[in-house]
Amino acid sequence: MKAAELCSLLYTEQRLKSFKKWPFDPKSTKTKTQNTCTSVNLAKAGYIFFEDNCATCVFCGKTLEFEPQDNPFNEHRSHSPNCVFLEMMEKDETEWTVKEFEVLIAALCTRECLTTVKRWQEELLVQGRKVRKRIEPFIDDNN
């Protein structure tokens, strides 16, 4: 992910754009009940869309499966109590300090680096299996 795109995820408005067809938004749900697990609340709680009814926190990387009546703020606190965003999700973004921005940017960058390293690890495992498969016929089982 490019730096500008990554940094844009600091803001609720940008995170909200990832929820194109969130199943629990009023316009897309068939029930008449008031859902608390809307795309707006998820974005405010630090999440972006992952798949189906799942979302991922851009700061801690925690992915959760949500139900219509889940409270994204409470679920975030419960499942990822050490997420750096928890302290700031109650504040208006316009009131964040430079220090708070630094902490959030560091969390975004760390999560992105970890995602990249995991992707590399998976690719190395795949390539290792391919190499092993190619050289196994040449390995003497008696040694």
Image: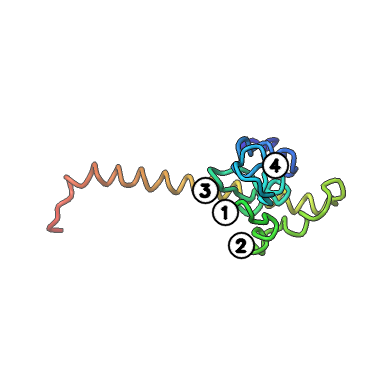
Please state the horizontal and vertical placement of residue 125, each as a whole percent of the image: 38, 48
Q: Check disc 4 and report the residue beneath it.
A: 9
Q: CA distance from mark 2 to mark 4?
A: 21 Å
Q: Please, what is the three-letter code of the amino acid marked with disc 1?
A: Leu
Q: Check disc 2 and report the residue beneath it.
A: 79
Q: CA distance from mark 1 to mark 3?
A: 21 Å
Is label 4 or label 1 in front? 1
Q: Check disc 3 and report the residue beneath it.
A: 117
Q: CA distance from mark 2 to mark 1?
A: 8 Å
Is label 4 or label 3 in front? 4
Are the two marked residues, 4 and 3, in contact with CB atoms closer than 8 angstroms?
Answer: no
Secondary structure at numbered mark 1: strand
Mark positioned earlier in the residue sequence (2 or 4): 4
**Disc on res. 64:** 1
Mark positioned earlier in the residue sequence (3 or 2): 2
Q: Please, what is the three-letter code of the amino acid marked with disc 2?
A: His
Are the two marked residues, 2 and 1, in contact with CB atoms closer than 8 angstroms?
Answer: yes
Q: Please, what is the three-letter code of the amino acid marked with disc 4?
A: Leu
Mark positioned earlier in the residue sequence (1 or 3): 1
Please state the horizontal and vertical placement of residue 111, each as a whole percent of the image: 61, 50
Q: Residues within 10 Å of mark 4 (few under 14, many from 20)?
A: many
Q: Nearer the viewer, residue 41 or 1?
A: 41
